[in-house]
Image (cartoon, grey):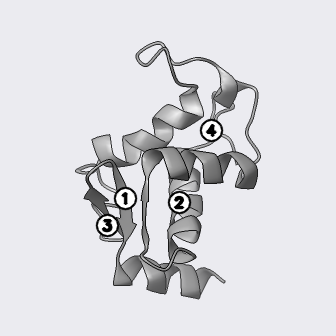
Amino acid sequence: MPDAHGRTTEFEISEVVLDILNNIPTGRATFRALIRGLNSRLPLTLADQVISETRPTERLWEQRVRNISSHRKAEGNFISEGYLIKINGGLQITESGKRRVTRRN
């Protein structure tokens, strides 16, 4: 469900990232690979497609994928909650993240 600005939330993006990583044998992926995977799995809004003002080579939704790492100390962030860990250039699912995916499905 989009936020008040019509954009997919970081939480929603994080949920799909968990699904993607849970289906990769190593449980890890680069941001580039996650962005490719998300593009086909997430219904993006017009507001998501706007070019980021702070990262002009990315659309807002792509920036939000990277924000999972940038906002890792924020309450509710999937790294802060222990579902993901930041790796060099990407993310990795944790055992707690795998359990979350299993409970959801």
Q: Is residue 93 above or below residue 41?
A: below
Q: Position of residue 23 (x, y in %)?
A: 58, 76
Which is more N-terminal, label 3 or label 2?
2
Query: Alpha-carbon distance for marks 4 and 1?
Result: 24 Å
Q: Is residue 45 above or below residue 76?
A: above
**Label 4 crowding class (10 Å Cα cut-off): few <14, some 14-19, many 20+?**
few
Q: Position of residue 52 (x, y in %)?
A: 51, 19
Q: Is residue 98 above or below residue 76?
A: below
- Residue at which label 1 appears: 91
- SS at circle 2: helix
Numbered circle sitting on residue 81? 3
**Label 1 crowding class (10 Å Cα cut-off): few <14, some 14-19, many 20+?**
many
> What residue is at 71 percent from the left and 51 percent from the top?
42
Residue type of the residue flagged with mark 3: Glu
- Residue at which label 4 appears: 3
Q: Are marks 2 and 1 in contact (CB under 8 Å)?
A: yes
Query: Alpha-carbon distance for marks 1 and 3?
Result: 14 Å
Q: How many marks?
A: 4
- Residue at which label 2 appears: 17
Which is more N-terminal, label 3 or label 1?
3
> What residue is at 53 percent from the left and 74 percent from the top?
24
